[in-house]
Image (cartoon, helix red, strand yellow):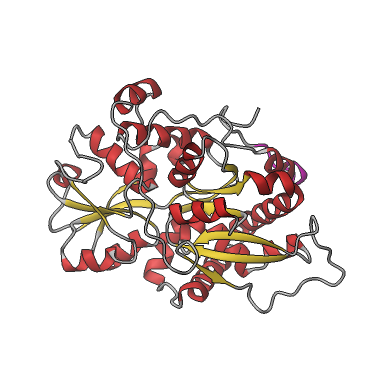
């Protein structure tokens, strides 16, 4: 279980290392533009929100960003925005999405907790706000059962994570420390070899035997299982109530201040999308896969899609207390110095939307704007 806050702070502040940004691809901050499905028409008489021609929304082509995938595919965002066009950018990594948010290339984004924390702390609390939750769970340690038969067998093996300092990398480093093993966070060398590998490459690396397992999000985890891997640990088992934030919604502070009605519209669409996902799980799974196919050119096979989708919980609650714990895990690993997260959340508009829907309000765990 996560260690207490004071212990994490004492152990983590001694070593500080800046998290590197990925080399950004030529297509705008390592992203790819995608268009609204052609069958989605703006309703007759619809008005622009806040006078905006468009709202630019970013997300990853991962099932853990299922709210965004389904919201795009089923037209929830466009409907909520009226005559203001919803424009989309797909990202491969958190740092590139934060760069796009900072530059104004996107206004609102679905993103993991670690890049949100890094973006906020590196800007001295001036770049973004977390305005809503999206997903919990969907992260697993999958291993080659011929080489690793128990958790103790992970010692001495090569285990992949998606990127230095990303959400899964921090979680795995924390788990390693809790086993009493030592690993240098920057190099990944030690009692376990932590091999930073892009999720697109991980299945081939696993198949070739160059890694013995991986701590990864869905659908990569289920792709490894389809290649003969075994789920050794579901990260949700390490958290209270088996819930932890894997995806949040962030907005640039400038856009939030200047266009609150547009932000509220996107949050309304997100809440409606999550409600639809829960009421129509099979149709939602199909919609997410259809959007993945549109974005990447390839749909997921059923033996990957079904178990991956089942392991993710979609939620409006940002699970703020778990984000604070994840930040302390990064401190413990020496990847972050005593983060000041006060004000990282502004859940005012989300709670307004939830109240209108007859849903209970959600908490910022004391980390909201004052």
Residue 369, percent across and down? 63, 31
Left or right relative to 368: residue 297: left
Q: Residue furthest right?
A: 45
What segment carries the magenta color?
Answer: 355-361
The quarter holding residue 237 reads top left
Residue at (43% x, 61% y) in the render: 92
In screen coordinates, is 189 left or right of 97?
A: left
The quadrant in which the C terminus is found is top right
Q: Going 32% across and 33% down the picture, which residue do you hit? A: 16
227 relative to 199 in the view: left or right? left
Residue 245 visible in the displayed image: no
- The number of numbered discs placed on residues in the rendered structure image is 0
Q: Which sits in the foreground, 89 or 151?
A: 89
Tell me, yes or no, if residue 263 can be seen here. yes
Query: Which secondary structure dominates the residues rendered in magenta?
Result: loop
In this view, 269 is above or below 74: above
Tell me residue 240's x, y (percent): 43, 34
Establish if 209 lies above or below 4. below
- Tell whether position 185 is magenta: no
Looking at the picture, how far across and down is residue 351, in whole percent?
70, 40
Position in image of residue 288 (x %, y %): 53, 67
């Amino acid at each position: 279980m996560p260690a207490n806050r004071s212990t994490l702070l004492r152990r983590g502040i001694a070593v500080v290392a800046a998290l590197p940004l990925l080399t950004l691809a030529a297509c705008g901050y390592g992203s790819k533009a995608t268009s609204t499905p052609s069958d989605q028409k703006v309703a007759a008489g619809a008005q622009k929100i806040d006078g905006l021609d468009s709202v630019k929304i970013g997300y990853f082509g991962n099932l853990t960003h299922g709210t965004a995938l389904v919201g795009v595919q089923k037209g929830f965002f466009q409907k909520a925005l009226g005559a203001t066009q919803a424009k989309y950018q797909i990202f491969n990594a958190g740092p590139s999405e934060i760069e796009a948010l900072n530059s104004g290339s996107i206004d609102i984004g679905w993103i993991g907790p670690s890049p949100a924390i890094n973006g906020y702390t590196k800007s001295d609390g001036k770049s973004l706000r977390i305005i809503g939750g999206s997903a919990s769970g969907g992260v697993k340690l999958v291993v080659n059962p011929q080489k690793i038969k128990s958790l103790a067998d992970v010692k001495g093996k090569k285990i992949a994570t998606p990127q230095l300092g990303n959400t899964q990398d921090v979680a795995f480093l924390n788990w390693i420390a809790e086993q009493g093993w030592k690993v240098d966070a920057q190099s990944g060398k030690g009692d376990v070899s932590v091999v930073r590998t892009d999720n697109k490459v991980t299945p081939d690396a696993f198949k070739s035997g160059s890694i013995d397992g991986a701590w990864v999000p869905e659908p990569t985890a289920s792709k490894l299982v389809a290649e003969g891997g075994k789920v050794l640990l579901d990260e949700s088992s390490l958290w209270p109530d088996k819930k932890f934030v894997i995806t949040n919604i962030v907005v640039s502070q400038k856009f939030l201040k200047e266009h609150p009605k547009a932000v509220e519209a996107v949050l309304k669409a997100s809440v409606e999308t999550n409600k639809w996902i829960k009421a129509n799980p099979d149709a939602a799974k199909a919609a997410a896969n259809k959007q993945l196919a549109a974005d990447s050119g390839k749909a997921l096979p059923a033996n990957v899609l079904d178990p991956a989708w089942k392991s993710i919980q979609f939620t409006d609650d940002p699970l703020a207390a778990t984000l604070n714990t994840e930040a302390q895990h990064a401190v413990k690993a020496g990847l972050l110095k005593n983060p000041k997260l006060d004000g990282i959340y502004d859940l005012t508009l989300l709670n307004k939307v939830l109240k209108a829907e007859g849903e209970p309000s959600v908490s910022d765990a004391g980390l909201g704007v004052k």
